[in-house]
Image (spheres, rainbow, N blue to C red):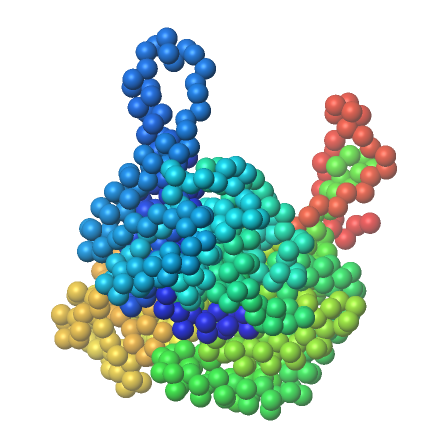
Amino acid sequence: MDAAVDSTRAFVKNVKRVIVKVGTAVVTRPDGRLALGRLGALCEQIHELNSQGYEVILVTSGAVGVGRQRLKYRRLVHSSFADLQKPQRELDGKACAAVGQNGLMALYDLLFSQLDVTSAQLLVTDNDFRDPDFRKQLNEAVNSLLDLKVVPIFNENDAVSTRRAPYEDSSGIFWDNDSLAALLALELKADLLVLLSDVEGLYSGPPSNPQSKLIHTYIKERHEAMITFGDKSRVGRGGMTAKVKAAVYAAYAGIPVVITSGFANSNIVKVLQGQRIGTLFHRDAKQWVQPGDTDARDMAVAARECSRRLQAMSSEERSKVLLDIADALEANEKQIISENEADVSAAQKAGYEKSLISRLALKPGKISSLANSIRVLAKMEEPVGRVLKRMELADGFILDKTSSPLGVLLIIFESRPDALVQIASLAIRSGNGLLLKGGKEAKRSNAVLHKVITSSIPERVGEKLIGLVTSREEIPELLKLDDVIDLVIPRGSNKLVSQIKASTKIPVLGHADGICHVYVDKSANLDMAKQIVLDAKTDYPAACNAMETLLVHKDLAKNGSLNELIVELQIKGVTMYGGPRASSLLNIPEAHSFHHEYSSLACTVEIVDDVHAAIDHIHRHGSAHTDSIITEDSEVADIFLHQVDSAAVFRNASTRFSDGFRFGLGAEVGISTSRIHARGPVGVEGLLTTRWIGRGTGQVVNGDKGVVYTHKDLPVNSC
């Protein structure tokens, strides 16, 4: 699939002349009136492309629909009540076209003029193209307009067209505006044809069917027989059938075509940026897709099927898989490190931030550490199928609440290739299928780690248990698969997590920010405070559990203890920023925001009046990740520990302890600040749900007359 994406980007680099066809369903609203917002967005995109040097030609439908709406209104105004009681004659289509074309072009002219763009109207009929002189004149006129930065707007002149229904006629030169757009693309030597529809692109079935999937690249040999077309457009002549026929005609004549939604505000621009938008038609498409390629849904379905085979294995067999993976990682350490060093070198040359490069690098001893953590997981008590609660529902009817895998997990992570190993091992231990999408900066590291891990999975389970998604363009499609993916866990920037939460109906587990606080109370042991604060900030500044804000009791600012803390941090190279009180007292730059994750050797310091002020600050500016208090006062400590509403809260300990491995979870899939399902470092238990297993002896409900409920709790280890 990546080959297709790369080829898409390759051909748009050479595009200069673009034909955009917009259909009636995009131009008009369901009531027949013009969709001003969509038309405005269309004109703005064409203006943007014009300013970038593209030659844009527009083919527009909508005249008949607009004219019909206007004439219906006129007839209503001029009809008596008696006239309206009579059967209404269908309006003449040619009259509708004549009236509507005038209004449609007037609106285009108005919208374009607001953007300082000039447009021109060109009406054509089927018979015009039979005349060689007309075709020559057409080329000359269009070329002249484009040289002047004028946008030519084409439409079929339905008012005088001699063609009759059915419109599609194999003897005709074109039969609707889709086929007209394809014809013009060839005639005017366009480099790209974009057909705007009311759906995102071509689907394998009706777009309203959840089982239908968007086809990113149309391959005639694969898709022609499998696609089922729905009804024609609600207002136009063709619908998707006409678009596909026009697209295939143009593509196989050498002009790439993209069918995409005209309801989005920037899809045309995105296509020309090389983004994977809509459905691409290209005569070389068959060469791009390798025989073994699978799409997003296929990967998810395969992962689920493999996970069920994994769950059918005994606990000892699943543990053996993990032990084999640990051995394979150590056996392939040189190759893994070599690929990782190549990623790090490329990231440095690309100018990535030091914090990202730090997370990217697999430091000496990291592979052995990962292997050992997997061995710890393998030796853990079996997490799947544990009886959590047992009760007698009725005499002879025993009901068990048991632990069960979630199903298929989608993990989207940035930078850290070691996360791939941790997540994969946790998924196997918990019996889940897995789809992984790592950052492009770790492409080589992720690929070799994925290969080493999947090669250790037994054939009877299948290596598709863990799928590696290598294209960023696959993410939007994956996030739509709420019927086959059960949980999304994003690990990365605030922007990444926020985008994913806004883009899916699948439950999302994770945290957007790691804004961790350390509050040093007036009763704190200063030597202890120095050690904890330094560790929390400098042990691994790029980690999400590193201290980002230091809160200090006001009494420590008066007795000089605050200065000692600041000096210790500055000696370690930490750049200090202050809140309003601290920046004034310490003469340091003021922080632009308290809600800021530095992920580097920098932090914010602020002075607070007491523990209650510290708690209030954390709730207003924190991210509910991990917060710590340093105090010798047990009463103050209890207030902090019970009132700070974060996933992890510590007393007299570094925030860096908030970690799955350090918590004894073996590894972690991430840290969650959610309040539903799992919170804090998420290990195996966070990847499990529950199900009920009942064992009866012939009981029936029969309106609740046939059973006597006992609801008696039983020991979970009872038979």
Residue 281: image location, x then y, percent: 53, 62
Q: Nearer the viewer, residue 332 or 579?
A: 332
Residue 225's quadrant in the figure? Answer: bottom right
Instruction: Give the position of the N terminus as an image quadrant.
Output: bottom right
Judged left or right of residue 463, residue 42 is left
Q: From this viewpoint, which residue is outermost toward the right?
A: 697
Residue at image coords 77%, 43%: 694
Q: From this viewpoint, which residue is outermost toward the top?
A: 82
Residue 167: image location, x then y, percent: 52, 41
Residue 452's quadrant in the figure? Answer: bottom right
471 in relation to 231, above or below: below
60 in relation to 705, above or below: below
Camera sees residue 234:
yes
Residue at image coords 56%, 70%: 284
Judged left or right of residue 667, residue 604 is left
Residue 370's quadrant in the figure? Answer: bottom right
Residue at image coords 41%, 50%: 128
Residue 601: image location, x then y, percent: 32, 79
Camera sees residue 33:
no
Judged left or right of residue 106, residue 282 is right
Q: Nearer the viewer, residue 187 or 670?
A: 187
Q: How many marks?
A: 0
Q: Nearer the viewer, residue 150 or 503?
A: 150
Q: Nearer the viewer, residue 564 or 141?
A: 141
Residue 165: image location, x then y, percent: 52, 37
Residue at image coords 37%, 80%: 352
Judged left or right of residue 298, residue 148 is left
711 in relation to 519, above or below: above
